[in-house]
Image: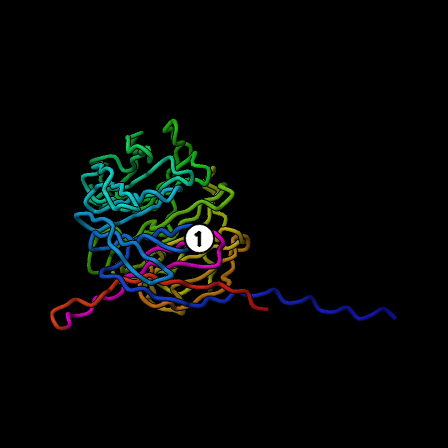
Amino acid sequence: MPAPQSSPAPEPSLKLERVREIPLPTAVLALDVSPDGSFGIAACQGGDLQRIDFKEATVQEIGRHASYASGVALTPDLQTVISSSYDGTLRWNDLKTRAPQRSVQAHHFWSWGMDLSADGRWLASCTGQYSAAGYKYEPGPEREPSVRIYNARTGEWLRDLPHVPPTQSVAFSPDGTVVAAGNLMGEIRIWEVESGRQIAAWTTPDLTSWGIIKSHHYLGGIFAMTFNPKGDELYVCGMGPMVDPMAGNGVQRWQRFDWRTGKKLDQTHEGESGQGLMEALAFHPTRPFFVMAGRLFQGQWNLALFDSVSGKNLVSTDAKHRITDVTFSSNGEQLFLAKAKQQEKPKDGKWPPYGQVEIWKITTQA
């Protein structure tokens, strides 16, 4: 008689646990963290750049823009902080001395965001203002270059890349050879960095809304994008279409593409999300999953981990407040969240802090 076969052991599940909260004076719009997770730099709504010591839970201002600081990156040698802003500038600050190294007026309008190539060689910033150009309220053409590429080590301009404004997100491939940008209308373009040659372009209609209630305009678009670690796929996120774009009740959505062909390979699975705007994406550095986060309108979560192969929602939680950026420590043991809390009324003549950076722990449980 054959021996009875045992049932396969259940796959281990993931658990998210918040371990520390660090308040900041104003909303945090972008965040970068040192590889060992010991410190980070927060780009804040007040225009300030704040260095956070995660062990001591201390905060120190190291630089300032004239308007919202919208992007931030540490150079690979951890000597310099590069930041972008709604004032249209890119700025380089010495991390140790806090001294400004250079400032470049990249745009006349806001820099919606920036990205630094993994090798620290290239810096990209994107811009653009939505101005209706016709009776269908379609965006007008560029008034200035939508994407600008710079030598990140010298601040020298390399090239301009055309898109349809507003271009709201930009990302380099892991090897730094190509750069992608996405806009309000869900149009994605990809170029070779060295030559500036456009090598792919497609449009996803699943992240943009046309308003027919209260007001007539487009809203939404691609709020964040990232290549997978292999560099052969592009992930984007935002919010699904709404009849009333002011409601903020579109589905929480990510999409996955073969960037060479523009073919959609997967997206948020039906029944695995609620409603709200997703603003942040990041891949775990050693394991096959990614994180998506943002604001919750209705549902159970605004922070979730997804299997990068199957697309399955592995674990999710309501982390409260708007999450604007996410990043991992290099060993993947810590997840860092940048947050923008609802601003409270002044108390005793002082505005309470409404920015926050949080450290979360990811553990595996049987």
Pinpoint residue 350: horizontal percent, then vertical percent.
Answer: 14, 68
Answer with the quarter of the image where residue 344 lies. Answer: bottom left
- Single out the residue that lies furthest toward the front: 97
Front one among 35 and 147: 35
Pinpoint residue 56: horizontal percent, then vertical percent.
Answer: 35, 62
Is disc 1 surrounded by few (<14), some (14 to 19) or many (20+) residues within 10 Å?
few
Answer with the quarter of the image where residue 291 lies. Answer: bottom left
> Which residue corresponds to mark 1?
36
Q: Is residue 49 visible?
A: yes
Q: Quadrant of the C terminus?
A: bottom right
Residue 288 located left or right of residue 213: right
* Residue 342 sits inside the magenta stretch: yes
From the viewer's perspective, is residue 3 above or below residue 32?
below
Count of residue discs: 1
From the viewer's perspective, is residue 297 above or below residue 229?
below
- Single out the residue that lies furthest toward the right: 1
The residue lying at 28 percent from left, 57 percent from top is 28
Q: Which residues are magenta?
A: 324-347
Front one among 43 and 292: 43
* Residue 337 sits inside the magenta stretch: yes
- Single out the residue that lies furthest toward the left: 349
The residue lying at 44 percent from left, 54 percent from top is 329
Pinpoint residue 22: horizontal percent, then vertical percent.
Answer: 32, 64
From the viewer's perspective, is residue 172 above or below residue 40?
above
Front one among 344 and 2: 344
Residue 116 located left or right of residue 138: right
Q: Quadrant of the N terminus?
A: bottom right
